Amino acid sequence: ETGVTQTPRHLVMGMTNKKSLKCEQHLGHNAMYWYKQSAKKPLELMFVYNFKEQTENNSVPSRFSPECPNSSHLFLHLHTLQPEDSALYLCASSQESGRHEQYFGPGTRLTVT
Amino acid sequence: AQSVTQLGSHVSVSEGALVLLRCNYSSSVPPYLFWYVQYPNQGLQLLLKYTSAATLVKGINGFEAEFKKSETSFHLTKPSAHMSDAAEYFCAVNTNAGKSTFGDGTTLTVKP
């Protein structure tokens, strides 16, 4: 247990569906991250929030929409996804963005059909 | 700009043998360096970190890494591999500016 939880752990959705991924951290951290991990590809940073403000959007398509209502919660809203979006989506948190290590959740395995 | 290069996407060792996973970085400012491990169907877990204190850093599960500024390296080692060490390992570099960069990962296989 790292103190970062993600729900759901598995999600299958059609290309016309709308769904949301949820991440919650119980560590008192101020920075939260979304990563995409695809088979045979490097870990891709998608979004960074520091003190609830988005500080990085790594050229992510608009069909992915993040939301950070407070420092403990992070959402990733999904709509009209493509099959190539199927991947493991990892959430992480750290004390602040920068020199601190990150604590990762177990991930949501997303399959787009 | 900063970057991380992990040499060797796959490393295979025999149980009991030395583990050496290579990581080279580039950074225009003093870096903070990390090694993470990922077991199947799990998130990444911190193994160890370098934050400008001692250059030889000890981590969990018997792993250690040495920061060598002259070689811009932060290689991960373990004297004797266990079957349970089989996993994917990621090197990462952070800066105070808030940027985190991960290497492509190295899959470690341990043969009985």
Image (cartoon, coloured by chain):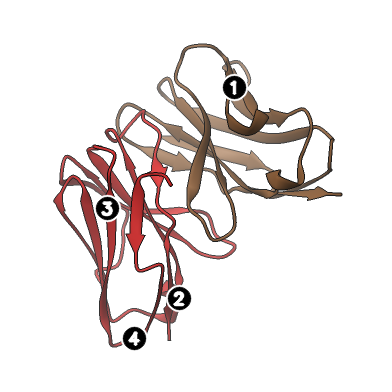
Chain colours: A red, B brown
The residue under label 2 is which amino acid type? Glu
Where residue A65 sits in the image (x, y, percent)?
Answer: 22, 65
At a point 34% along the width and 54% down the height, the residue shown is: A5
Mark 2 chain: A
Provide the residue designation for mark 1.
B58
B68 vs A4, nearest the viewer: A4
The residue under label 4 is which amino acid type? Met
Gap in angstroms between the C-alphas marked 2 and 1: 39 Å
The residue under label 3 is which amino acid type? Glu
At a point 53% along the width and 11% down the height, the residue shown is: B54
Labels 3 and 2: the sequence-earlier one: 3
SS label for mark 3: strand
Provide the residue designation for mark 4.
A15
Count neighbours of disc 2 (C-alpha within 10 A) and say few if under 14, some if 14 to 19, many if 20 or more: few
Residue A86 in view in this figure = yes
Count neighbours of disc 1 (C-alpha within 10 A) and say few if under 14, some if 14 to 19, many if 20 or more: some
Q: Are marks 1 and 4 on the same chain?
A: no
Provide the residue designation for mark 3.
A24
At a point 60% along the width and 27% down the height, the residue shown is: B74
Provide the residue designation for mark 2.
A84
Gap in angstroms between the C-alphas marked 1 and 4: 46 Å
Where residue A89 sits in the image (x, y, percent)?
Answer: 40, 62
Instruction: Please give the label number shown on residue A56.
Output: none
Gap in angstroms between the C-alphas marked 1 and 3: 29 Å
At a point 40% along the width and 52% down the height, the residue shown is: A105
* Residue most extreme to the front: A1
Labels 4 and 3: the sequence-earlier one: 4
